[in-house]
Image (cartoon, helix red, strand yellow):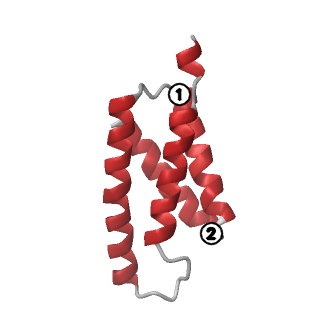
């Protein structure tokens, strides 16, 4: 039961994913759309790799997944990303963790 509620790895992964997104994805919308899309795709590949590492280390139940997503979303919001960007990336992570 204790392992089921231990979310340390999920929180760490959420912070790692946010760090990747912050480093790779520009906040400003003035960046050309093709360049921005390229950076987003590159960031998603790096995030996918990190998610797969977490899935090998730990079983992601709904509580751990929710904790990961919440950590990720708040890290991006605190970094100044728009609601649209944070929602889009958070949804993508949810789909990726479930596939």
Labelled disc at residue 6: none
Furthest toward the right, the residue is: 78
Measure how far apart labels 1 and 2 are at the Cα level: 26 Å
Q: Quadrant of residue 64?
A: top right
Q: Is residue 98 left or right of residue 83?
A: left
Is 44 located above or below residue 13 in the figure? below
**Residue where numbered disc 2 is placed:** 82
Q: Nearer the viewer, residue 43 or 32?
A: 43
Is 70 located above or below residue 28 in the figure? above
Q: Nearer the viewer, residue 10 or 40?
A: 10
Q: How many marks?
A: 2
Q: Residues within 10 Å of mark 2 (few under 14, many from 20)?
A: few
Name the residue rendered at 31%, 58% in the picture. Answer: 45
Indicate the position of residue 1 as horizontal and vertical percent values.
Answer: 57, 10
Kind of element beneath mark 2 = loop
- In primary-sequence order, the first of circles 1 and 2 is 1
Name the residue rendered at 52%, 37% in the picture. Answer: 10
Q: Residues within 10 Å of mark 1 (few under 14, many from 20)?
A: few
Name the residue rendered at 59%, 21% in the picture. Answer: 5
Kind of element beneath mark 1 = helix
Indicate the position of residue 29 as horizontal and vertical percent values.
Answer: 53, 83
- Asked whether the beta carbons under mark 1 and mark 2 sit within 8 Å of each other, the answer is no
> Quadrant location of the C terminus?
top left
Labelled disc at residue 62: 1
Name the residue rendered at 65%, 54% in the picture. Answer: 74
Is 6 located above or below residue 52 in the figure? above
Q: Quadrant of residue 6?
A: top right
Indicate the position of residue 16 as horizontal and vertical percent values.
Answer: 49, 52
Q: Nearer the viewer, residue 84 or 73?
A: 73
Is 10 located above or below residue 4 in the figure? below
């Amino acid at each position: 039961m204790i392992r089921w509620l231990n979310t340390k790895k999920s929180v760490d992964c959420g912070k790692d994913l946010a760090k990747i997104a912050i480093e790779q994805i520009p906040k400003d919308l003035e960046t050309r759309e093709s360049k921005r899309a390229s950076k987003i795709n590159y960031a998603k590949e790096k995030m996918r790799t990190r998610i797969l590492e977490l899935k090998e280390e730990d079983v992601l139940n709904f509580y751990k997944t929710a904790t990961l997503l919440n950590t990720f979303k708040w890290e991006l919001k605190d970094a100044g990303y728009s609601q649209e960007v944070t929602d889009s990336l958070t949804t993508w992570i949810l789909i990726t963790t479930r596939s």
